[in-house]
Image (tube, rainbow, N blue to C red):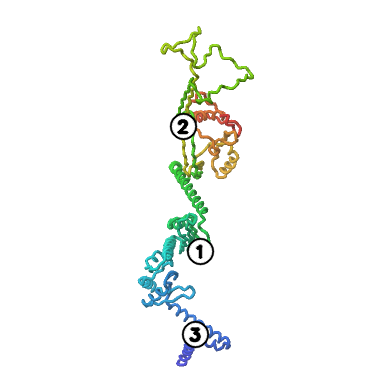
């Protein structure tokens, strides 16, 4: 029995040894390593050493502090004062060798910025403003230096103002202000140049460039806007006055047209939406706006209503006397020269002719005595009378000056598309010019499974030039109070038979008669009708 027990324990010992062998897997690895060649053993050891080194480096790198830049750029910052402030606050820092940025620990970033700001160090621009005038000037400072300092201060202030605009990172302003002269021929106008540095990926709108031009022009006396030049850091000229004005004006006109169309479209929606509901219609409005500036001056005269402006009269009367005439003296009393017979005989004086100054005689040849004086009456001497009148008239004149406002609505096109299938349209009446599209509409309605309405095409009334009557072709409008008579003539041109007593009726009554007595079979089988048929 004892032998049996001993034999039964032998396998147990051997099993315990196998379990002990399995509990140490590294022993089998060493056995395998010993069986490898020397070259493979060296390669395996080198790989293990490299893995350990990489792991150690990763651990050391994860334990290093995270550094962040104190400022994005040191431009405009006194780096020495920043370093002194960080050193005084015992804040570690380092400088990035590639970008030159000043780095501090992420945990110390807020405290570092507060220390630097408390030390009076902050990013500033390099422009010198009017603070240059606060410095005490030397006793012998010339007028040229004073003018130069003022110009530098003005340039710096303008550059700071321009730099505060959106999309502008920095700016520089150069002013050319000539010295004033008392001589007109030596008078020169100032000019200005503005260099703007924009942020990457950004640009200036035309309105912003125009704002910069106006800002600089109004800051310098006698500086015209056309003498201001704006350039970006890439050398692009931004201040082309004509192009800027045209682009700005075109943009304003486009925005004005879109706002007008949007307002009118919204009004159409307000009318149709309560009746048709949402999604049952589409409405679009297109406005033709005239932005041309028109100024006219008219001067009219009315010759029927003249006004007397001035009048001048001149009356003269001269009567020859019978007294002695001529210059007295012996020379003037010489007898006349010998008479010469005329070539032609002149007509003799009438028998009853009495020379001026001679006594008058009656029909019996007796001398006529003046009863008042008792002397014979003498024949009168000839009298020279002259009556001259000068009148100046002022015609009735009226001068009118008209300036039409820009943005006049010249034409308005409104398109409204309704869902006729939802409305249950059964009959459609339209012009013959749309006859070609009718088969396509019928085919589309058939594909959609909609009920097909009946189409009726009426002839178009055309003008002598061949265009149909309508606003698109500048047809004259028809007043509402005069629409009854043309409507009656249109019904008659379409083959209907309106009675004679319908002519003086109103347009509403004419339409009511046309609806009640409409007969499509009487419509002429033609595409157009001349306007004379109306």
Query: How many numbered dots are placed on residues in this image?
Result: 3
Q: CA distance from mark 1 to mark 2?
A: 66 Å
N-terminal of the two: label 1 or label 2? 1
Q: Position of residue 478 (x, y in %)?
A: 50, 33
Q: CA distance from mark 2 to mark 3?
A: 129 Å
Query: Is residue 40 found left or right of 275 in the rendered image?
Result: right
The single residue placed furthest to the left in the displayed view is: 118
The reply to whether discs 3 and 1 touch (Cβ–Cβ < 8 Å) is no
Quadrant of image for the N terminus:
bottom left
N-terminal of the two: label 3 or label 1? 3
Q: Residue at x 39, y 72 (%)?
A: 109
Q: Which residue is mark 1?
A: 233
Q: CA distance from mark 3 to mark 1?
A: 71 Å
Q: Position of residue 183 (x, y in %)?
A: 47, 55
Q: Which mark is residue 25?
A: 3
Looking at the image, which is closer to me, 299 or 411?
Answer: 299
Q: Position of residue 431 (x, y in %)?
A: 56, 36
Q: Secondary structure at mark 1?
A: loop
Q: Position of residue 316 (x, y in %)?
A: 47, 25
Quadrant of image for the C terminus:
top right
Q: Which mark is residue 266?
A: none
Q: Residue at x 51, y 51 (%)?
A: 246
Q: Secondary structure at mark 2?
A: strand
Q: Secondary structure at mark 3?
A: helix
Is residue 78 shown above or below 327? below
Q: Which mark is residue 396?
A: 2
The single residue placed furthest to the bottom in the displayed view is: 3
Marks 1 and 2: which is nearer the front? 2
Looking at the image, which is closer to me, 194 or 236?
Answer: 194
The single residue placed furthest to the right in the displayed view is: 343
N-terminal of the two: label 2 or label 3? 3
């Amino acid at each position: 029995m004892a032998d049996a027990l001993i034999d039964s324990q032998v396998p147990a010992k051997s099993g315990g040894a196998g379990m002990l062998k399995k509990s140490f897997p590294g022993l089998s690895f060493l056995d395998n390593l010993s069986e490898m060649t020397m070259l493979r053993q060296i390669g395996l050891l080198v790989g293990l050493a490299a893995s350990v080194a990489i792991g150690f480096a990763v651990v050391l790198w994860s334990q290093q502090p995270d550094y962040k830049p104190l400022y994005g750029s040191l431009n405009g910052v006194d780096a020495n004062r920043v370093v002194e402030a960080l050193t005084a606050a015992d804040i570690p820092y380092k400088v990035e060798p590639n970008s030159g940025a000043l780095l501090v620990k992420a945990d110390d970033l807020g405290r570092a910025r507060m220390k630097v700001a408390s030390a009076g160090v902050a990013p500033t621009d390099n422009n010198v403003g009017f603070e240059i005038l606060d410095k005490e000037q030397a006793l012998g400072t010339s007028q040229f230096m004073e003018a130069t300092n003022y110009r530098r201060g003005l340039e710096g202030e303008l550059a700071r103002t321009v730099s505060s605009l959106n999309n502008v990172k920095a700016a520089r302003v150069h002013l050319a202000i000539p010295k004033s002269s008392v001589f007109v021929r030596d008078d020169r106008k100032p000019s200005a140049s503005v260099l703007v540095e924009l942020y990457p990926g950004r640009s200036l709108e035309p309105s912003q460039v125009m704002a910069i031009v106006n800002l600089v022009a109004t800051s310098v006396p006698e500086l015209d806007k056309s003498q201001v030049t704006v350039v970006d850091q890439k050398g692009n000229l931004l201040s082309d006055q004509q192009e800027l004005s045209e682009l700005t004006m075109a943009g304003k006109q486009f925005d004005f047209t879109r706002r007008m169309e949007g307002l009118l479209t919204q009004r159409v929606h307000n009318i149709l939406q309560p009746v048709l509901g949402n999604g049952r219609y589409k409405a679009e409005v297109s406005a033709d706006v005239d932005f041309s500036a028109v100024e006219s001056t008219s001067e009219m005269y009315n010759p029927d209503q003249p006004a007397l402006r001035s009048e001048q009269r001149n009356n003269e009367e001269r009567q020859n006397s019978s007294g002695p005439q001529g210059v007295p003296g012996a020379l003037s009393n010489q007898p006349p020269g010998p008479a010469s017979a005329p070539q032609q005989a002149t007509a003799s004086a009438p028998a009853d002719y009495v020379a001026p100054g001679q006594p008058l005689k009656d029909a019996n040849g007796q001398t006529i005595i003046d009863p008042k004086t008792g002397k014979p009456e003498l024949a009168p001497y000839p009298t020279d009378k002259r009556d001259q009148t000068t009148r100046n008239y002022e015609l009735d004149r009226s001068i009118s000056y008209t300036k039409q406002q820009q943005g006049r609505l010249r034409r308005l096109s409104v398109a409204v598309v309704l869902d006729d299938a939802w409305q249950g349209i059964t009959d459609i009446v339209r012009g013959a010019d749309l006859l070609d599209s009718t088969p396509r509409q019928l085919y589309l309605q058939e594909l959609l499974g909609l009920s097909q309405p009946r189409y009726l095409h009426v002839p178009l009334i055309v003008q002598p030039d061949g265009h149909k009557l309508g606003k698109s072709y500048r047809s004259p409008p028809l007043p509402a109070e005069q629409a009854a008579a043309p409507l009656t003539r249109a019904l008659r041109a379409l083959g209907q038979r309106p009675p004679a007593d319908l002519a003086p009726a109103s347009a509403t009554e004419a339409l009511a008669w046309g609806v009640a007595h409409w007969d499509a079979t009487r419509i002429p089988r033609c595409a157009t009708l001349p306007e004379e048929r109306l």
